[in-house]
Image (spheres, rainbow, N blue to C red):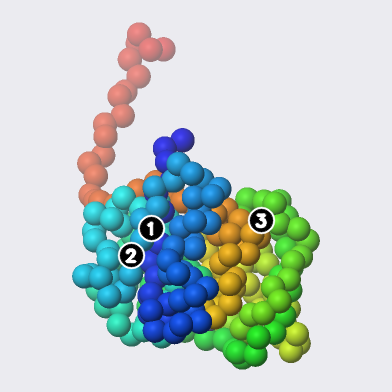
Amino acid sequence: MAPLKVTIWNEYLHELEHEVVGRIYPDGIHGALRDAVLERYPDALVRTATLRQPDHGLSDELLADTDVLFWWGHKAHAEVSDAWAAKVHAAVLQGMGLVVLHSGHFSKPFKRVLGSHASLLWREADEKERLWNLQPSHPILEGVPAYFELEQEEMYGERFDVPTPDELLMISWFQGGEVFRSLCTWRRGHGQVVYFRPGHETFPTYHHPLICRIVANAALWARRRVTVDASKCFQSRELEPVPNPTKEHI
Ligand code: ZN
């Protein structure tokens, strides 16, 4: 199989602005996610892009050469240009995978791809999260036990305003009593879309071995299978003549 081409997009503001976050993620959240993918798939080509780079670190060539794009954003969703959100959306329809993490639920690309507001309940109270594995045979959950816990996380609760997922793979329970659809998939056009909830920036969630495993599994599962140029899918086509049977054929 050709090497997996992963692009990790990160807002990369909290790590630079908040000492606590910078200590947890000295190479940025994108660095931790890159390590998670490379640990499991050392041959993968992993590139990173961040908000404040020109064009947010993106290019048409990069999207076309990306099998799966990860997206982590939080406080600066509005700074992402509508034009790049539209290009990410188009790339998904053509076959690129998209894995949206944690507060990326409010990102322009995710809301656009799902066509929903993606609102939810939240509470930042350093509470325990228990994640339940609903589909142990699914490739994204390979190696993941029936449940596991994160000692400290931000709470996200229902109702999560998204279209009913094609696959609901994990549900989270929080100490405060709320539950949340934590790991979901959708197909949009020719692309696979994954949402995975954990990953608040003040907790070391992306250093947790099982979270890293799910991140890497999701990269492989959501990867591009085809590239279909939608602009070439609606074309007139001449009727091909069907040969009449001749005596030789009968
Ligand atoms: Zn958060």
Badge number at residue 7: 1
Residue 188 in the image: x percent, y percent? 45, 62
Which amino acid lies under the numbered mark 2 shown in the image of this protein?
Ala
* Residue designated by label 2: 49
1 and 3 marks in contact (CB < 8 Å): no
Q: Residue at x 78, y 61 (%)?
A: 146
Indicate left or right for 233 with 194 as reference.
Answer: left
Return the residue nearer the eye: 115 or 2.
Answer: 2
Ranked by sequence position, the earlier of labels 1 and 2 is 1
Q: CA distance from mark 1 to mark 3?
A: 21 Å
Taking depth in this image into account, of 76 and 100 the one nearest to the observer is: 76
Looking at the image, which residue is at 60% across and 89% down? Answer: 124
Task: Please give the name of the residue rendered at 31% of the width and 74% of the height, measured from the top-left corner.
Answer: 51
Which amino acid type is marked by label 3?
Leu
Residue in front for this viewpoint, 191 or 124: 124
Q: Secondary structure at mark 1?
A: strand
Please name the amino acid that badge 1 sits on: Thr
Picture coordinates of residue 7 (x, y %)? 38, 58
The reply to whether dot 3 and dot 2 touch (C-beta < 8 Å) is: no
In the rendered structure, are the residues bearing label 1 and label 2 in contact, judged by CB atoms less than 8 Å apart? yes
Residue 162 visible somewhere in the drawing = no
**Which of disc 2 and disc 3 is earlier in sequence?**
2
